[in-house]
Amino acid sequence: MTDISPLASPFPVLPDIGGVTRRVARAGYKNWGRCDLTYVELAEGTTVAGVTTKNVCCSTEVEICRDGIAGGKARALVVNAGNANAFTGYRGREAVEQIMSQVAAHLGCAPQEVFVSSTGVIGVPLPKDKARDGLSAAFEAEPCSWQAAAETIGTTDTFAKGATASAMIGGTKVSLSGIIKGSGMIAPDMATMLGYIFTDAAIAPALLQQMLDEANVRSFSCITVDGDTSTSDTVLVFATGAAGNTMLTSMDSPGADAFQAALTDICTQLAQLVVKDGEGAQKFIEIDVTGAAGDESARRIGLSIANSPLVKTAIAGEDANWGRVVMAVGKAGEPADRDKLAISFGTTKVAANGFPVEGYDEAPVAAHLKGQHIRIGVDLGLGSGRATVWTCDLTHGYISINADYRS
C-alpha cells in the first residue's frame, strides 16, 4: 500500500476472539506481490448476521451469502481480493460453489456455512484453479494477525482498517473486533465495501440480525465517497459464543442494550475509516442535519449534500460556498423551507432564515476549512428529525485512481 491517505489512522490493537482463526495466502488473482486471499475458520455454533448491497446487479457471492445469512450458522469466511467475480454468469457461480465445497470438505461442515466475498474488477470470472490452489495454501498457512487479514482484503485501500469495542453482558465481558475494506464505489444502500465483525458473545441469529440492521442505519448507510453503490457490498457479524455469556435472545435479555451500543460503535468506527480512505481524499467531512421532518428525511438530505460534486469540490478548494449546500438540500426531495434554513461551517453560522448572516466573521470559517476534519451543520427548522452523514472531499486524485483501475 502506497500513497497513504493523509486521514489514515494507525492500525489499532484488536483483541483475539475465541473461536476465530485467521489465515492469508496468495492466490494470484491480480498481478500484485502480496496475499490476496483471507480465510477465517469459525468455531462450531457460531451464529451470523449480515447486510448486503441493494444493487440489483449484485455478484453471485452476495446472492449466495444472503441464503447463508438466512440459515444463521457459520463455520468459515473466504475473501478474495483483486477480482469482484460480478457479472460473470454461471462461471462465477461455479467458482463460488467450488470454494464453498472445498472449505466444507476441509472443515466437515455444510457448504451453506461457508461465506464467500470477492472484491476488485467486475466482469472477469474468478479463476477456479487459482481459487483452489489459494485455499489449499491458506489451509496450511500459520494463523495471522488482524492487520494482515485487513491488508489482504484491500484493493485501492491505502491503509489497513480495523476497530474494536466491548460490552458487559451480565458479569461477562464480551469483545468485538472488526476489519473492513473500502475506498471507492462507496455509497452503501443497506455496504467496493466489505466489512467483517467478530465477537465472542453468544447471540441468537435473529437478534444478531436485528442488532446489525439497527447499527447499519446509523453507520454504513450514513457514509458516501462517490455516490456509487457496489455490486459486492457486504457486512457480516459472526458471534462465536466463546465468552460463555448467557445467550442473548431478545432486546429484553440482560446486556442486550450494552451489546447493541458496542456493535453500533464498532460499525461507526469502521464506516468512518472507509470515508477517511476515500479515493483521493484530503478532508473528512461530517454533515449534521437537524430540524428535519424525520430522522430518515434528515439522512437523505445529509446524503444529498455529501454526494454533491459541487459541495465536495468546494470543500477541496477550502471555499465556504454555502449556496451549494442550499442547492443540495433543495434537490433531496425531502421537506425543506428555504426561509427556515440555517447553515454553519464549523461553529460559525453563515446563513439563516433564507439570508446570509449579516456581518459574520469569515476568519474562523476560513481557518476551519483549512483543516482535515470539516463540519457542515444544516438546521431545517421543521421538526425533530436528525442524522449525521460522513463523506470526503473530491479531488483530482479520485480521477487518477479510477481512470486506470483495471490496469
Image (cartoon, grey):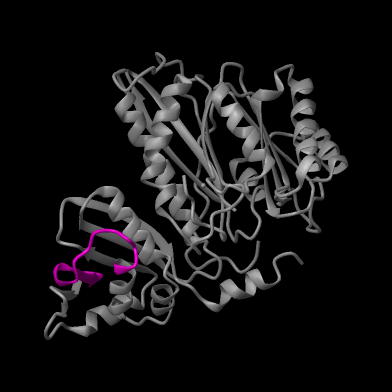
23 sits to left or right of 323: right
Q: Is residue 195 visible?
A: no
Q: Position of residue 120 (x, y in %)?
A: 69, 54
Which residue occupies 21% across, 57% down? 290
User: Going by the image, does 33 lie left or right of 251?
Assistant: right
Residue toward you, 299 or 15: 299
For the point 32% across and 61% down, the residue is: 333
Q: Residue most toward the top?
A: 246
Q: Is residue 66 above or below residue 266?
A: above
Q: Looking at the image, which is closer to me, 232 or 273?
A: 232
* Badge count: 0
Report the front residue among 407 and 170: 407
For the N terminus, give its image quadrant.
bottom right
Magenta span contains residue 77: no
The magenta stretch is: 330-347
Indicate the position of residue 314 as horizontal and vertical percent values.
39, 79
The answer to whether residue 57 shows anywhere in this view is: yes
User: Position of 318 compared to 68: left or right?
Assistant: left
